[in-house]
Amino acid sequence: MALKKKPVNGMRDILPAEMQIRDYVTGVIKDTYRSFGFTPIETPCVEDIANLSSKQGGENEKLIFKILKRGEKLKLAEAEKENDLTDSGLRYDLTVPLVRFYSNNAASLPNPFKALQIGNVWRADRPQRGRYRQFMQCDIDILGEASNLAEIELILATTTTLSRLGFDNFQIRINDRRILKAMAAYAGFSEDVYDSVFITLDKMDKIGIDGVKEELLQEGFSAAVCEKYLELFEKVRGTEDGVLYLKELLGDYLEKEVMDSFSEIIDSVNANKEDTFALVFDPTLVRGMGYYTGTIFEIAMPEFGGSCGGGGRYDEMVGKFTGSNVPACGFSIGFERIVLLLTEKGFQVPETLKKTAFLIEKGVAGDMLNEVIAEANAERKKGRQVLTVRMNKNKKFQKEQLMAEGYEEFKEFYKNPLK
């Protein structure tokens, strides 16, 4: 029986043309984030199953690729449930591993700590455009900074990166989990149903305000409470300054400092941004992760028709590892979707090195071959990219393929130099 040559469902092979774009995007991301003071780190792709299943990852916890116990620890006959068979899993995001990393290494890290992490994550999700079961994530996080300077820097660093990749006229949608809770309290929902209400509210983009109302009523919530709640969103939409409107309306349900800090984030980003994007207050923005405690944000790009990244504040997550809370905030760029959009646009990576191909006839060997290799090395020292490759029978087609890869110059070497 022949082995299967296609990747596992939801996984994919990445061809050289896309890999070139991915390398370029990774380089721009790293250079930009480093200029903002973020430090690269790396964490393992495998995490303890207890960490991954700690009710912090929202729906992603249902999508974990779990790893069987090994050797004597795997006791199939005694297993009563799935968790008896597994002790670890592939990470579904980079935030849980980052917080574990910080909790384990905080004594060796600066305070605040500005982390940059790029790596693959895995989710047993339904594959679709821009979504795979293995995909690259790119996160920046600031741990130990309680003030809104963290949010301001994260938004400016992320939008600067997107601008350098050629994107403009996108939106950063921004909200705060505390505003969400205050609006729900104002309408009359009890605190124990907030999560259920927010899950329904998060569908506003897809089903509209009438659809949200219908679902809330189906869940058994009072018609008067639902009406009062959804009226809030209509009124915010109709005001010139929704933040100011809610600040005045929700005074009994929300600390003044929360709205003051939120306004300062918006004002500071707008005053210092150099890019053509809009920072938009969106009171319907929820974000699915259970660990968010404050500000939340999301990248909306018209070219994609959905989210291309997001993040927020998660001040209570470190405490679940150490017993002491540490302020934390992060922003993740949708790496795969950014690469997809660039590929669909026909993006060409700017060439930094002149690309030359040395085509070597099959008969060139021994000292003659060493001379060719020495010449190639000399060219590389001058800052050129040199490919040494054996000459094909169909030299014309070979050159056409290399030109498609960006090779501008060709040098041919024959056993008989008179050719």
Image (spheres, rainbow, N blue to C red):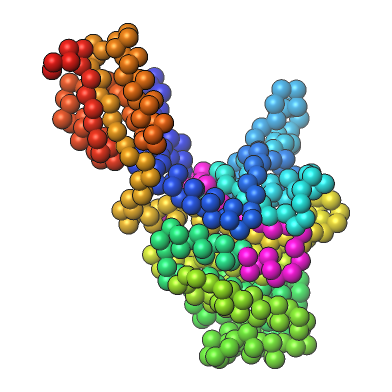
> Left or right: 150 with respect to 338?
right
Q: How many marks?
A: 0
Q: Quadrant of residue 370?
A: top left
Q: Which quarter shows the C terminus?
A: top left
Query: Is 158 placed above or below 88 here?
Result: below
Pick the front one: 124 or 157: 157
In this view, the residue farthest toward the top is 366
Query: Is 47 placed above or below 224 here?
Result: above
Pick the front one: 95 or 38: 38
Q: Which stretch appears magenta?
A: 127-153
Pick the front one: 280 or 56: 280
The residue shown at (35%, 20%) is 373
* Residue 244 drawn in magenta: no
Query: Is 71 placed above or below 269 here?
Result: above
Q: Quadrant of residue 195?
A: bottom right
The residue shown at (56%, 73%) is 272
